[in-house]
Amino acid sequence: MQSKDDPTSNTERHTVVEATRPLGGVARPRLVVVSGLLLGLQVELGEQPVLVGRAADCGISIQQPGVSRNHCRIWREADAYWIEDLGSTNHTYLNGQMVHRAQLRDGDQISVGGNAIKFFLGTSLEASYHSELIDLAIYDSLTGFHNRRHFCAVLDEELGKTAGIAPLSLLMLDLDHFKRINDQHGHLAGDHVLGMVARVVRERTPAGLPIGRLGGEEFAIALPGSDLHAATALAETLRAAVAATPVETSGQVLTITVSIGIAQTSADIANRSSLFKHADDQLYRAKQEGRNRVCVAG
């Protein structure tokens, strides 16, 4: 068994919580990222140390050049939690002061390469306040999905983790004839339709996959480690499920359909911009070929 003083100790047992909503009523000590690439990420603290760094196996893995591979660690010793810098290039800061080793107190702020991480012993007014602010910053209020800005940040992180190791596929979904729904039935009906589609997508998308609302009636799903075959299977499931779920509004029953474009990372598609472009090109093709269909780059 590895010692808790060993900075390479296993961190896989930590519970990582994407959403901040469960914070209320939970008294477990935790780290909450309050600014930077992983805004909103929470990690519950237990007996095992948490490593923060650029390495993919860190408990909080921040894929940025200013972050060392193993930047710092947080661990429990007796009834207290401690932080220690692991010889990082750009240092670790605690409440604005460079730190080598120190005991953590409720509400302390840790800075790593421009990313701010708050330490909370349990529920508190400040913890709830940060939870609410983060919700507003990263979630779309209508669908509950990541907003465009945060989805792009999550996608960049996933691309950094899978680069040269495994494929990553991207689905881009767009509701068909959505403007007609708004024009004929009003924007409240349009919001009702968007909520229905979001519910269907959420229920049929495997847990843990990042889903974003890019704007209006357009959504995106990132599939780290999945090739075009797996991505197409999910896309067809979503397309069929939306088409099979009618929406009743203003006394009328509407049949809603979606068009989906898919792209996968490759030597020529290695960053977010190129992945978005290729998926969007396929989405446009799906629209041109009659809508209610899936088109794949390849």
Image (spheres, helix red, strand yellow):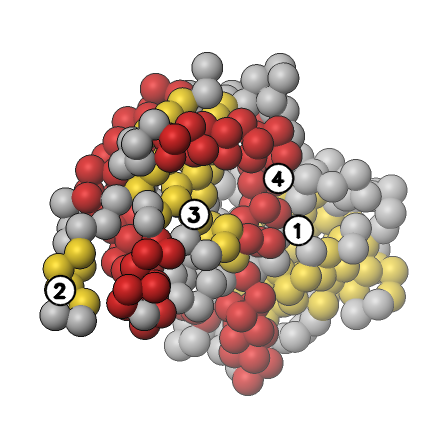
Which amino acid type corresponds to the residue marked 2 in the rendered image? Answer: Gln
Q: Can residue 240 be spotted in the picture?
A: yes
Disc 4/disc 2 C-alpha distance (Å): 42 Å
Residue 219 disc label: 3
Of residue 34 and residue 283, the one placed in the foreground of this image is 283
Specify which label sits upstream in the sequence, 4 or 2. Answer: 4
CB atoms of marks 3 and 1 within 8 Å: no
Left or right relative to 173: residue 200: left
Counting residues from the N terminus, which is met first, the one under dot 2 or under dot 3?
3
Q: Earlier in the sequence, mark 3 or mark 4?
A: 4
Q: Secondary structure at mark 2?
A: strand
Q: Where is residue 109, by image quadrant?
A: bottom right
Question: Which residue is the site of mark 1?
Answer: 37
- Residue 43 in view here: no
Name the mark nearer the viewer: 3 or 4. Answer: 3
Q: Residue at x 49, y 23 (%)?
A: 264
